[in-house]
Amino acid sequence: MARGMIRLSKSCLGEEEKKAVCNVLDREFLGMGDSVLEFERLLSNYFNRPVVCVSTGTAALQLAIQALGIKKGDEILVPTMTYVASFQAISANGAKPVPCDINPESLLIDLSDAEKKVSSNTKAIMPVNYAGDPSDLTEVYNFAKKFNLRVIQDSAHAFGSKFNDKLVGSFGDISCFSFDGIKNITSGEGGCVVTDDIEVINNIKDSRLLGVVNDTVKRYSGNRSWIFDVKSQGWRYHMSNIMAAIGIEQFKKMEFFSKKRKHLAKYYDKLLISREEVNFFNRNYDNINPHIYVVRIPGLRDRDKLIKIMNEYKIQIGIHYYPNHLLSYYNNIKTTLRNSEILFQELVTLPLHPDLLVEDVKEVVTKLVRAIKLIRH
Ligand SMILES: *Cc1c(COP(=O)(O)O)cnc(C)c1O
């Protein structure tokens, strides 16, 4: 990375994380043990609900789906505007991700489109709290009730976001979070499932460790089982003590990170409100802990060139996301999702992370406006 580059996103780590990892290394117990148990307890207190930690956010989604008994032939409604992880977690279970269009105002799932796609095979809906925004959840849960569906929230962007004064994850059916390197907090790689459904929690405690029955309890008490039973397909998707040690330190910094993200997003809004060439999305950053800051540039034709010019200005910008229904693996039914296909071409993601400065935000906006003028001439 060139020096002076304003990065799109990054991990924000300090001495605390380094020390915590070294402590784990010194104890010479790297796998799943006391640090993971402690991280799960912290998270469980935070959400006031049972939590199970796993190796990635994708694993959290995949195992949550498996725990519901969703399998080949079953369908899950999911917005096309998401990271491919949401789709892969569904297809990993043999189930079919049914791509739905998005609401152009919020970039969240368009439930009127989803309604057209409900079939007798539909078992669940996977709303994505895009950019950390959970504001459609009342409608999503009403929809799920109407069609008798389970809800698996892809809350990978929404750690620390609130909805009606309640933390995302502390209410609803099942919420899955990611702690990958650039998410709101990180454990290096990692994720967790939060739910009141104890059957789901217990199922994942086994499935994350190759399906070995009750291995979690035995490992936490230092008595790994040598003679055991396996009753279902499992995976090596557990979290390690190294990861959890990072996660615990990051969790302590959560309020600080969240304050910064919210402050920077509000500042972007403030600078952009008077700019005709750039539209932002109306989100309430008193409640939302923004994972990404996405803008729409109406009439944008040559986004590649925009990205290139911004890079020359030493500013990284990104795209969230290429619609999943256009990917070869998922476009076998040749769906057209108009809003997503039109909007997608005009979206860019601007830098946002806790180490970003207010001056950086100013510079990003100035340079973005300059770059747009350049490509329009
Ligand atoms: C990051 C992310 C995931 C998956 O999380 P990983 O920890 O990277 O596996 C899932 N969905 C969305 C929307 C994400 O951004």
Image (tube, helix red, strand yellow):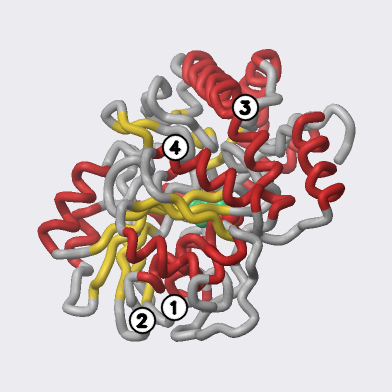
Q: Which residue is mark 1?
A: 93
For the residues labelled 2 and 1, say whether their Cβ atoms are less than 8 Å apart: yes
Q: Is residue 81 above or below residue 23?
A: below
Q: Which residue is mark 2?
A: 71
- Dividing the image into four equal quarters, which quarter contains ligand 1? bottom right
SS class, disc 3:
loop
> Which of the two labelled residues, at mark 4 and mark 3, occupies the earlier sequence position?
4
> Which of the two labelled residues, at mark 2 and mark 3, occupies the earlier sequence position?
2
For the residues labelled 4 and 1, say whether their Cβ atoms are less than 8 Å apart: no
Amino acid carrying label 3: it is: Lys
Query: What label does residue 45 carry, if any?
Result: 4
> Which of the two labelled residues, at mark 1 and mark 3, occupies the earlier sequence position?
1
Amino acid carrying label 2: it is: Lys
Amino acid carrying label 1: it is: Asn
Q: Residues within 10 Å of mark 1 (few under 14, many from 20)?
A: some
Is 130 or 191 nearer to us in this picture? 191
Q: Is residue 183 above or below residue 201?
A: above
Query: What label does residue 253 carry, if any?
Result: 3
Q: Is residue 313 visible?
A: no
SS class, disc 4:
helix
Q: Quadrant of the N terminus?
A: top right
Q: Position of residue 63 (x, y in %)?
A: 46, 68
Label 4 to label 3, Cα distance in Å?
16 Å
Is 305 or 193 nearer to us in this picture? 193
Label 2 to label 1, Cα distance in Å?
6 Å
Q: Position of residue 103 (x, y in %)?
A: 30, 46
